[in-house]
Image (cartoon, rainbow, N blue to C red):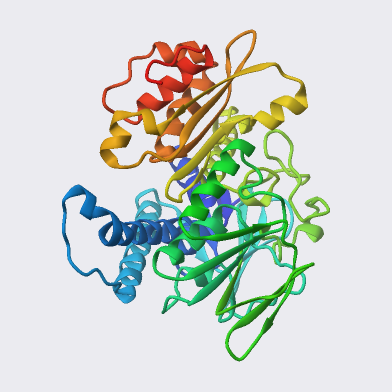
Amino acid sequence: MPDFDVIVIGAGPGGYVAAIRAAQLGLAVACVEKEPTLGGTCVRVGCIPSKVLLESSERFVMARDQLAEHGVVVGDVSLDLTTMMRRKDAVVKSNTDGVAYLFKKHGIERFTGVGELQGRGHVVVRHEDGDTELHAEHVILATGSSVAPLAGVEVDGERVITSDHAIALSEVPGHLVVIGAGAIGLELGCVWARLGAKVTVLEYLDRVLPTMDAEISREAKKVFTRQGLDIRTGAAVRGTKRTKQGVSVSVEGASPVKADVALLATGRVPNVEGLGLVAAGVATDDQGFVQVDAHLRTSLEGVYAIGDLIRGPMLAHRAEDDGVAVVERIATGAGHVDYDLVPNVVYTEPEIASVGKTEEQLKEAGIAYRKGTFPYQANGRARAMAATEGKVKLLADKESDRLLGAHIIGARAGDLISELTAAMAFHATSEDVARVSHPHPTLAEVVREAALAVDGRALHI
């Protein structure tokens, strides 16, 4: 008889949420995690610590450069990086402790070690004291992802670093080169630029945030350039070389970029090493992603894979949704994720958020659409906040008016996108959003005005 109903390998956002939901549904749950603390990359060294530093660095800039226009005089402002990092660590600990508390609350049995799949329902936990064998009716693989390597770039943790190191630097680098202009690269580049570093961003493709709507991407590059980032697109990095002074980053067709530190932020790859997938009969594709069907089932019966292990957006909330869908299907027979409506947020200042189709995707698919945009500059609350950069852009089907995509660059974009995600989930039209009363004065009015603009009747511009 199996020891458990469900074994989850990995305690990141996908894994720990799957374990909690399974326990809520009355299943006996074990969770295997190789790190001594729970929460995975997101909680320990990714989403949470980076957002703490983004928040702290933004407040530093506000105190130094922006409060005076509000009539708030603070005198000389200086950086205490040690205290900033100590606060970041405290927030991380609070979150990891929170996950541990939830495991205890829900009776989830935790095993520390590396989980290896040895066949259907059979997992071996490898740890310092030996091996522990576990059995269950169902196994969920949720081991997440790691920084993708780049040919010629050797990470040493000192001169060439990853995001894991970038959230824990002991001093502000004089010059930081960021390799990759995706969300991680831009967020961490902004943190250190705010704290005083010269930041150069090298992006292989022709624009920053290449998966987002091109119009929003162009706007973002202008904003970050005004903030002092030196952004170079079409820059193919061919390698790094450690020097006496720091690091030299070679770029195809251009002079090397010399800096104190180089941050590798060119993407992530699934963590499949040590899982025993091949021997167990779990199929992967040519890039190492675990292959699953529409219900997240792998090629081995009773084994599922979620989050960064499978194709799709590598986002914590997507992994959580995957985990909930799998365990609900196990327990109730029904579980679903709409992958067309997974919002994406970049937590720079201003924030950038999107959901649904980009304008380029609609054009490529031959879908006729109407577009409505509205600038923050014309919004009373944005003016009061001195946060007038950015816009909301909505895309609606030309015939039915159903919302197909929403894209925001501006203050609180990560919060505003939720209204549009919910609207799109219920097949709302731009007219539906426009007819809903939005409180005044709020930034949410920018969303309503963009919806009105789809029909050419925005009120305040």
- Vertical side of 355 occupied by 18: above or below: below
* 118 versus 207 height, above or below: below
Along the line of sight, the residue nearer the viewer: 11 or 260? 260
Residue 243 shows in the view: yes
Q: Position of residue 255 (x, y in %)?
A: 72, 73
* Residue 379: x %, y % from top left: 34, 29
Quarter of the image for residue 82 reads: bottom left
On the image, the x and y values in percent for residue 257 come to 65, 74
Q: Nearer the viewer, residue 414 or 253?
A: 253
Which quadrant, please, contains the C terminus? top left
Q: Residue at x 52, y 60 (%)?
A: 229
Q: Nearer the viewer, residue 436 or 6?
A: 436
The quadrant in which residue 66 appears is bottom left
Give the left or right position of residue 303, taking residue 69 as reference.
Answer: right
Residue at position x 70%, y 31% in the image: 360
Residue 15, x across and y down, in percent: 54, 51
Task: Confirm whether residue 267 shows in the render.
Answer: no
Q: Residue furthest bottom?
A: 244
In the picture as drawn, the residue positioned furthest to the right comes out as 286
Does residue 432 appear left or right of residue 147 in this picture? left
Residue 323, relative to residue 375: is it above or below?
below
How many numbered dots are placed on residues in this image?
Answer: 0
**Figure check: 418 above or below 304:** above
